[in-house]
Amino acid sequence: MSKKSLLSLLLTAALGAGILTGCQGTASPSPTPASSAGKDSVVIAMDTNSEPAAGFDPAFGWGAGEHVHEPLIQSTLTVTKPDLTIGYDLATGYSVSDDGLTWTVTIRDDARFTDGEALTAEDVAFTYNTVKESSSVNDFTMLDRAEAVDETTVAFHMNTPFSIWPYTMAVVGIVPEHAYDSATYGQNPIGSGRYVLKQWDKGQQIILEANPDYYGEAPTIRRFTILFLEEDAAFLAVQAGQVDLAYTSATYSDQSVAGYSLTAYRTVDNRGFNLPAVPAGTDAQGQAIGNDFTSDVLVRRAINIGIDREEMIENVLNGYGTPAYSVCDQLPWYNPASQVEYDPEAAAALLDEAGWTLGSDGIRERDGVKAELHLLYPSSDSVRQALCADFAQQLQELGISTSIEGVGWDTAYDRAQSEPLIWGWGAHTPMELYNIYHTSADTGLAGYSPYANAAVDSYMDQALQCTDLETSYELWQKAQWDGSTGVTQEGDTPWVWLVNVDHLYWVREGLQVAEQKIHPHGHGWSIVNNVDQWSWS
Amino acid sequence: MSRWNQRKRTLALLGCAALLLCAVTVAGLLFQPLAMETDFANKQLAPGPGHWFGTDWMGRDMLARTLTGLSLSIRIGLLTAVVSALLSVLLGVTAALGRRADAVISWCIDLFLGIPHILLVMLISLAFGRGFVGVVAGVSLSHWPSLARVIRGEVLQLRQTTYVRAAERLGVPRGRIIRRHMLPHLLPQFLTGLILQFPHAILHEASVTFLGFGLSPEQPAIGVILSESMRYLTTGKWWLALFPGLSLVLVVLLFAALGEGVRRLLHPASAHQ
């Protein structure tokens, strides 16, 4: 046998060995602590993307950004309650001026940082002025500056009224002015929250211990360890009994492990397609924008009711999900008018009405043009790939010819301007509605998918300007559907929402996980928001 | 069978291998629609009568996917092997004919051989925007150096042979010498090199796609199939990796046998055994 064929054999063997060892390679974060030894500690497996790359600095995305969660190590002014209304952490009360431009927040006087210094309004003002300067993940353009009025009162001077400021205050962890250095704080955070960072082995684990000086109720879980594992390694760790709670996905939901139960938490971690609502063309930079097929509102409505969401949940998520009708299902600002029934006949009728009639090959046509859609999904996400494939198949049944393509995030944003892409959203702030549906001043179209409706814009502008949260919820709801226009089925339907993906965990028997807030997008730190209230039985 | 001499046996083997590879290629083309078809009612089925290779997480038939993947691999292999073999002949001959060209090309060969193959394939594939074009460009632009070096050596040797020197003295133009006297001599090396390029190309296509730098995940390519199967190995879905992996090895072995056979037939020392 020649050298070349020998070499090719060797390469094959190497490839095979790679496959065999691939699942083992990540499974060995060696210093795994003895699990569930005490009744007040817990070991949790999270996915490797959840490890905060920039450390535990709120200015660099800890707790905030795309995947919001409570910062644990730091305190926040407000918190979101299980029903996603606003509660207090450091704050004892807040008020807003009639013009909406000044927020005054009073804070408790007994909070101390773990280095012994008292937490004052100065620290709060410093934190907000710092994140405004340097936050790369959150938008703070509405804030002009924060100012400490006295020891326990802080005033936020705004550039524009921003009624949902309390939701922003719920994600910003307060850092100490006297001990903050943006270069090192992320690795050695000092806060006033429920836990203290004890140890961080990068790429492996994080250990947090209860803060003995915490001003609130003392945590029942005194110590928790987070291991960062790939999905298959997390499952192996469960099988080996090394962790008390581990994230998992529908892929593993047909498995069972002795001593563990599979627990699903409701989420607003939704998946949906954008349907470009303007005809095909190019924008000022010459980039393709719009789609002739989906620019017809009848087509978008037909797609919205022609999709069987329940079937999709059964098929792709093994039943672990709920139908999604908006980007904010079940949240206080959700408008129930978004909900639609699956009705293939009505969908077909809508397509007929739009002039797309069934051809002999089962594909609809209008004026000799075939009904075609090219659907995109992020190539790194297998669940979205399967949802995309199922969506494509269901559209075929409606008589729309479909093809799918995996794309990287480097090109996905641009391509979604003209072709439907499957997105994942879901946050604990109504700002997400604004980001998705509000037009931007320079293009006159919404940012992620071309769409514009002046009435929807106006409701959201009003919602941000009003001074009362309750009233703003109503306005956010009206932005979705006000009885005559909006983004729902009877309205413009510029996005079709498919499913909310349940977050699945293997939970060791005996571990009582406290009641969870509806989880936002991101299968990571949300689960430990209230780890201080978990217990063993 | 015993009455056949080795030459005949080699020829028969060659025929069989070529036929099998063609069959796989054609079958893959025919199965393409089936390979993309999802059927969520029948997902994760173990191998059985309806689905010989089982089905995957979207209920796609693994036999169809494997065949389509191999077919795609063979076609990519064909394209890249031809491109890189032509490239190597061109560069090898150029290098052997001029001293300055030789310095430049030898330096290039050393440079390309010095970079790990898979890294080079990934880089070129990325630069060409991934997908089919990226993979073909990546594999074909990285596989020419070793054959180019062989051909260069051969041409250097040929230049010293008496008949070439005689032709030179007689004033035969250089182009004619290359066409008439050199290229026919290079044919065995070229053909063997071309065919032995196949397994390389196929394996590299599979690896680069496996690593996520090649074809998009909805394409039924062997690399995609294998990397998807990894997620299910821990849950005991062995058939997702086993059959496609074995088939890949089989195809690679067939090509290796084909190349070996061609070498035996064309090489003067063994041609008449």
Image: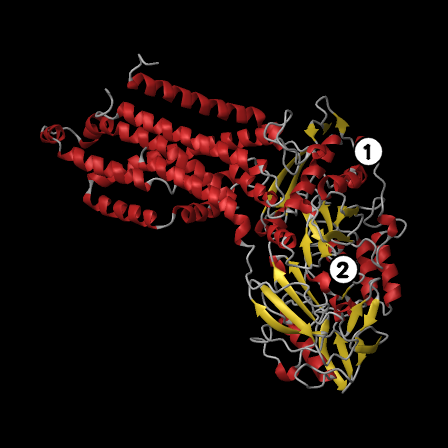
In depth, the one of A402 and B15 nearer the eye is B15
Is B56 placed left or right of A532 in the picture?
Answer: left
Type of amino acid at the residue the image marks with label 2: Gly
Is B191 placed left or right of A83 in the picture?
Answer: left
Indicate how the structure is coloured in the image. secondary structure
Real-space Cα separation, disc 1 to disc 2, in angstroms: 46 Å
Reply above or below: B140 against B53: below
On residue B269, which mark appears? none
Where residue B82 appears, x then y in whole percent?
A: 38, 32
Where is the N terminus of chain A found, in terms of image quarters? top left
Disc 2: CA contacts within 10 A as few (<14), some (14-19) or many (>=20): some
Q: Name the residue carrying label 1.
A: A344
Q: Secondary structure at mark 2?
A: loop
- Residue B178 image-quadrant placement: top left
In depth, the one of B51 and A43 nearer the eye is A43
Where residue B135 appears, x then y in whole percent?
A: 47, 40
Where residue A310 appears, x then y in whole percent?
A: 79, 41
Type of amino acid at the residue the image marks with label 1: Pro
The earlier-in-sequence mark between 1 and 2 is 1
Q: Chain of mark 1?
A: A
- Residue A7 image-quadrant placement: top left
Q: Chain of mark 2?
A: A
Q: Name the residue carrying label 2.
A: A510
Reply above or below: A87 against A337: below
The residue located at (75%, 82%) in the rendering is: A111
Q: Secondary structure at mark 1?
A: helix
Of labels 1 and 2, the one closer to you: 2
- Residue A331 image-quadrant placement: bottom right
Residue A274 in view = yes
- Number of marks in the image? 2
The residue located at (80%, 82%) in the rendering is: A108
Where residue B3 appears, x then y in whole percent?
A: 31, 12
